[in-house]
């Protein structure tokens, strides 16, 4: 009986691990990390950014504020779904309030980061020009980068393709986390190297799409 119980417990544990592995957010693995922020807005375009004119001042953004839906491609399965909420930080100091959740109803109840969208330049893919972007999340200690691409178009940015992170050996950081949690990540500590890496990833199959859905609901909880 003891052996049967042990086997059953092991089977349940393995099943639980399988479910956890399938449900873990791939976004954490698709980001690059830098020990210090790579972009400050002094030598590149970052959004939001401040503006001043005769009658007003504040923070302007090319990327639409509101709720976005992330669809992560999976082979022989329906896409994984996550939600991203982007809100404006203020009018004097410019940043995006970034928040992720598996369900849109959970937005407003999760942890946030102060982040910025960075224009990384252009690349050519299949003979067509595309824009390369990164979402620079947080600033201390260091920043995480979600690599993005889009077809150039006028108006507010409301759709991105999410690029893969096929980390070269020289950028890999190997670590052993507790239990099932990995300590591995991809570390790039140079703005020029990140741009070069993004251009390479732009020619790989995308891992998903990030699409604007709607404004933040008026009655949404704000976790500032």
Image (cartoon, rainbow, N blue to C red):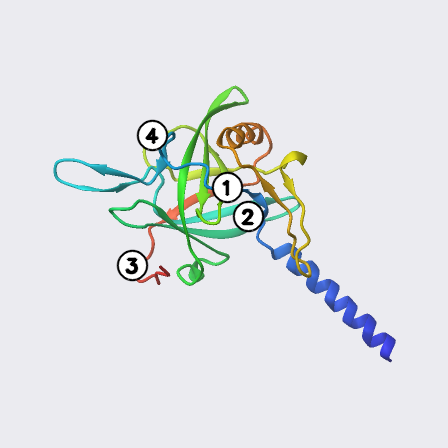
71 vs 135, nearest the viewer: 135
| Res. 191 visible in picture | yes
Number of residues whose C-alpha sits closer than 10 Å to that of mark 4, classed few (under 14), some (14–19) or many (20 or more) = few
Label 4, label 2: how many angstroms apart (C-alpha)?
28 Å
Label 3, label 4: how many angstroms apart (C-alpha)?
27 Å
Q: Residue shown at 87%/75% (left/top)?
A: 3
* Residue with the most extreme top position: 127
Can you say whether 222 is above or below 188 in the image?
A: below
Q: Are marks 1 and 4 in contact (CB under 8 Å)?
A: no
Number of residues whose C-alpha sits closer than 10 Å to that of mark 2, classed few (under 14), some (14–19) or many (20 or more) = some
Q: Which mark is residue 218?
A: 3
Earlier sequence position, callout 2 versus callout 1: 2
Image quadrant occupied by the C terminus: bottom left
The residue under label 1 is 146
Q: Residue shown at 34%/60% (left/top)?
A: 222
Earlier sequence position, callout 3 versus callout 2: 2
* Residue with the most extreme left position: 55
The residue under label 2 is 27
Earlier sequence position, callout 1 versus callout 4: 1
Residue 103 is left or right of residue 223, and the answer is right
Element carrying mark 1: strand
Q: Quadrant of residue 13?
A: bottom right
**Front: mark 1 or 4:** 1
The residue under label 4 is 154
Which x, y percent locates residue 25? Answer: 57, 53
Q: Are marks 2 and 1 in contact (CB under 8 Å)?
A: yes
């Amino acid at each position: 009986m003891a052996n049967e119980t042990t086997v059953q417990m092991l089977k349940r544990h393995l099943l639980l691990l399988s479910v956890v592995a399938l449900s873990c957010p791939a976004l954490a693995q698709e980001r690059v990390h830098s020990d210090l922020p790579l972009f400050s807005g002094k030598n590149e375009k970052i959004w939001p950014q401040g503006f001043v004119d005769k009658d007003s001042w504040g923070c302007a953004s090319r990327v639409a504020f509101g709720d976005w839906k992330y669809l992560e491609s999976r082979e022989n399965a329906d896409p994984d779904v996550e939600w991203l909420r982007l809100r404006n930080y203020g009018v004097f100091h410019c940043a995006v309030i970034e928040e992720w959740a598996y369900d849109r109803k959970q937005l407003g109840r999760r942890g946030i980061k102060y982040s910025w969208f960075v224009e990384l330049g252009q690349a050519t893919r299949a003979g067509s020009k595309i824009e390369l972007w990164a979402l620079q999340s947080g600033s201390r200690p260091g920043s995480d980068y979600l690599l993005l691409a889009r077809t150039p178009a006028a108006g507010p940015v409301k759709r991105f393709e999410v690029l893969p992170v096929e980390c070269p050996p020289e950028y890999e950081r190997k670590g052993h986390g507790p239990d099932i949690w990995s300590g591995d990540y991809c570390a790039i500590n140079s703005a020029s190297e990140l741009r070069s890496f993004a251009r390479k990833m732009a020619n790989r199959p995308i891992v998903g799409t990030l699409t604007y859905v709607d404004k933040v609901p008026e009655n949404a909880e704000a976790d500032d």
